[in-house]
Every structure is written in structure tokens, then in C-alpha cells.
Amino acid sequence: MSDISLRLADHADKPTAERLWLMFRHDMSELEGDLPNPDGSFRDEWLHMAFSDPDRAPYLLTRGDRPIGFAFVRGLIGPTRVMNSFFVVRGARRAGTGMHAAQSIVALHPGPWEIAFQEANPGAVKFWRRVATKINGDAWTEERRPVPNRPDLAPDVWISFSTTAGSSNVSPVDDGA
């Protein structure tokens, strides 16, 4: 994974994140039943907040000079960090890239964490349970919570755990510095 890099994205990276966001929302549309807007875009308020809200951090995942994913974290100022959105392009999945990125992001922001995913997404179910176990052993919990303002959707699954600085089994990805 020497050619994989994870770094805090800046405003110059926003157009790249926007293109990746379309792929992410396309994947999620299968689970949520959301159709594109009339202009072909998808709802993108989380994308814009990731680049403008001081309580959030956008990360860009690259392989060499190629963007392969992103992660948006919220709750940096509050008591609990939340993996708000996480995406790895299909061509980079199942090679340990997502696991390493998720572990690295958690290591950058020690403290309580929550990560939500959909039970109907078997890849996400398996992935996030493995991430929690890799980071915190069996010291994590899982619960189902209704999706706010979406009674038509099945409840999200939420994984919760807590880390302290230097406590997770992580060797951080190159931060691009």
C-alpha cells in the first residue's frame, strides 16, 4: 500500500470530491431509492458541509495520482466523531484500501466514534464490523436507529466504539505531507 495516500482535502480538491460524490450517491441510490435531480446530480449537502463546516473534515484517498475515495468526518468539535460518508471506487475495493483508510482516519481523531451503514448493504455490514473489530477488538456496540425524516427506509445500523491516542491497531496511511 505504499502508493496509497490519505490526506485532508482542501478547496482545490472539491471538484474531485464532487465527481467521486456522484459515484457514491449512485451506489447509495440502490439502497435508498433516491433518483438523481433533474440535472443529473444527487443531493449533496453533506459534501458541501464537509468543505465548509469547522466541525467536519473531508479526506481524499488516492493511489498514486488517482483519486480512489473519500471520507467525511463530523463531530470534530463535539464529543463524538461520526464517519459521515465513506467511499472507495469499485476498482480499488477488496484490497485492504478501505480498511487501512478507515483505521487511519480513526487514529487521526481519537475519542468516541459512531459509524452508520445500511443492513441491506452486505458489503458495508461486513466491512464496518471488521473495521470496528480491527480497531477495538470486541469493545464495540451495534444498534439500529431510524433514519431521520425517512420513515420509508429501514433503520440504519450504528456501530459505536472509543479510542484513545495511540490505542488502535493502526499504522497511519501517508498523510500527503
Image: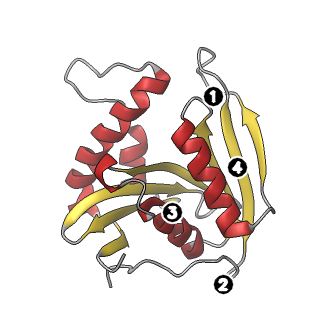
- Residue appearing at x 66%, y 84% in the figure: 166
Amino acid identity at mark 2: Gly
Q: How packed is label 1: few (under 14 Cα within 10 Å), some, or many (20 or more)?
A: some
Relative image position of residue 167 (x, y in whole percent): 70, 80
Residue 45 seen from this side: yes
Distance Cα–Cα, label 4 vs label 3 = 15 Å
Q: Earlier in the sequence, mark 3 or mark 1?
A: 3
Question: Which of the numbered marks, if any, corresponds to residue 96?
Answer: none
Q: Earlier in the sequence, mark 4 or mark 2?
A: 4
Q: Are marks 1 and 4 in contact (CB under 8 Å)?
A: no
Question: Which of the numbered marks, if any, corresponds to residue 147?
Answer: 1
Q: Are marks 3 and 2 in contact (CB under 8 Å)?
A: no
Residue 81 seen from this side: no
Amino acid identity at mark 3: Met
Q: Label 2 belongs to which residue?
A: 166
- Residue appearing at x 63%, y 16% in the figure: 151
Q: Label 4 belongs to which residue?
A: 159
Q: Earlier in the sequence, mark 4 or mark 3?
A: 3
Distance Cα–Cα, label 1 vs label 4 = 15 Å
Q: Label 3 belongs to which residue?
A: 99
Q: Is residue 13 left or right of residue 73?
A: left
Position of residue 109 relative to residue 60, above or below, is below
Distance Cα–Cα, label 1 vs label 2 = 33 Å
**In the rendered view of the protein, which quadrant contains the N terminus?**
bottom left
Which of the 4 image quadrants contains residue 42? top left
Which of the 4 image quadrants contains residue 7? bottom left
Distance Cα–Cα, label 3 vs label 1 = 25 Å
Q: Secondary structure at mark 3?
A: helix
Relative image position of residue 113 (x, y in whole percent): 67, 59
Q: Earlier in the sequence, mark 1 or mark 4?
A: 1
Observer-side mark, 3 or 2, equals 3
Amino acid identity at mark 1: Val
